[in-house]
Amino acid sequence: MRTIVLALLLVAACGPTTSTSTSSSTSSVEAQTAAQIQPTWDAAKAQAVLERTQRLHLAPSLSGLTAGERTAVTELIAAGERMNRMYMAQRHPDALRAADWIAAHPDRAAERDLFRMNIGPIATTLDNTREAFLSVPAETPARNMYPQGTTKERMDAFLAAHPNRRADILDDRTVVWEATDANRQRALSTLDLHLVLDALHPGLREKLRTDQTYLAVPYSVAFAEDILFIVEKLNAAAAAVESGDPAFARYLRLRGRDLLADDYEGGDAAWVRGHFTGNLNAQIGAYETYDDALYGVKTFFSLSLLQRDTARSRELQSALQDIQLVEDALPYQNHREVRSDIPVGVYNIIADFGQARGTNTATILPNEAYLARQYGRTILMRGNILLNNDIFQETHRAFAAAVIDAQGNDLTAEGGFYRTLWHEIGHYLGVDLTANGRDLDVALEDTADLLEEMKADLVSLTSARILNQRGKLTAAQLRSIYASGIRRVLQKNRPRREQPYQTMQLIQWNWFLDKGALKFENGRLRIDYAAYPAAVESLLREVLTIQRNGNRTAANAFVDRWTTWRPELHEVIAQRMRDSERTRFSLVTYEALDGRQRR
Ligand SMILES: [Zn+2]
């Protein structure tokens, strides 16, 4: 009995498993420690952040769903809520304890809102720092995905001495544990208990027995109880939509198996290429690596539950018939043949969980180059964010502050929607390999992302011009897309070089000034729409040339040359935009998650 109690305590101490059902024996310990949690910000500090927070409540009408789809929504929400807990556990070792404290203190509205906004006990402050607002340890780059206290120096040294361990330890879907006897035992007993996991990870048992210093534990093993719960929910959702939308049902079942195997190829193929005929879609699993501050390789859990906007999705599919024309119009040689059956749809968010929660405007997945090459990528346009009026008003205030009065109303939400759509499609077009056949990210390394994003921005503006020429966009629509292209590149703060999006936006801003598409007049900017298309084309030609040459030094020289920030120009505009700001953060709640989140 004594050893069993000890083992349970160790499980509680080292662990990402978020299930509450297995931890009943440790609940008194948890309750004790939870009681020690306290708010650490005073009311004024919390209020300062909350006053700058925009509250969005997403409540798409679900009346068009079939009975089976409604059942699937319930099952997928249950899966999503569990993924949300897994995401919290991935990001901070005390996040679930903090979540319990929040749940036990419904009177603490400020802490509850901060916790929801930040999905955990660490908040972004008005000074753009990250701070704990509850009495938990400060955030570390290791988050909860590497042993506490792991530094990059220490891990680099270990990997240099053990290069054969690199692939497992830096795998996108493993948690790194210290190779203690207790951790070893915990992982092995999970395999004993769930033979399906053992069967789907050949060779893992031996590694868990013999690896030294660190164990690379697949997510399905580290989060076994949670994953099994989610698989059950995915299968139940699949059964509910089987008769109405068999391709979606097959995807859900495959994704369940993917989660058990930590290999998403099957589900990704079904997701990207499947012809879903119903009203639902869902992004499910661990994809994005933004939260891994140590190596940027660990993926974090998310689930987005989406309702298709059928009319808008159809409209987009028909616009795609012109995609080859856009490709052929891009200023470079060696055009490729582009498929016109790119899977793109417009959706309204029913609910987002984990890493996907927030105000993302579009998703393009999967990320892995080999999967994208084999199956393509699915593009999910998030309509009730992209066209949300409150979000638009905030971005419009900044635009109107930056440009001359006569052009302040050129920007529309619709313009931003189309610009974003063609940005995502832009990733399918243009140069995808260097002249000597190397992958762009291999050749260009840290500059690859920046150039790829800038290419997509410029392809988007090019396609708007072509669709206008073909009579598919009106002059007013084209102007609003161009205005959105300008709003996109104006910055409220001087970007740091390690911020790829902001850096490439500043490059465009400077290029447009240089080519006369933007003029600085009496502290404001005037857009010259006549000079705009040529400015876009010349910059796109540069970008495609740099990508095709694949020379990282030349790429960096280009970036350095075009990222100047002049106090008497950029800073003047930036200050005007900052002064127009009413909200900086957002707190999104969902009708589908019932009234609890509405208060
Ligand atoms: Zn992009």
Image: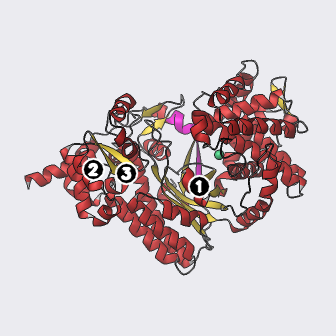
Residue range (magenta): 47-56
* The furthest residue to the front: 436
Taking 190 as reference, is 428 left or right? right
Q: How many marks?
A: 3
Residue in front for this viewpoint, 34 or 565: 565
Q: CA distance from mark 3 to mark 2?
A: 39 Å
* The furthest residue to the left: 1
| Residue at the image position 86 percent from the left and 38 percent from the top | 534
**Given the image, on which type of amino acid does mark 3 rest?**
Ala
Q: Quadrant of residue 433?
A: top right
The secondary structure type at the circle numbered 3 is helix
Instruction: Name which of mark 3 and mark 2 comes first in the sequence.
Output: 3
The secondary structure type at the circle numbered 2 is helix
The x, y position of residue 343, in whole percent, is 66, 62
The x, y position of residue 228, in whole percent, is 35, 64
The secondary structure type at the circle numbered 1 is helix
Colouring style: secondary structure
In the rendered view, would you say 183 is above or below 236?
Answer: above
Q: CA distance from mark 1 to mark 3?
A: 41 Å
Instruction: Name which of mark 1 and mark 2 comes first in the sequence.
Output: 2
**Given the image, on which type of amino acid does mark 2 rest?**
Lys
The x, y position of residue 74, in whole percent, is 47, 69
In the rendered view, would you say 548 is above or below 428?
Answer: above
Q: Is mark 1 within 8 Å of ligand 1?
A: no
Which mark is nearer the camera, 3 or 2?
2
Residue at the spot of label 3: 103
Residue at the spot of label 2: 207
| Magenta stretch contains residue 233 | no
| Residue at the image position 44 percent from the left and 48 percent from the top | 172
| Residue at the image position 26 percent from the left and 50 percent from the top | 208
Residue 397 in view, yes or no: no
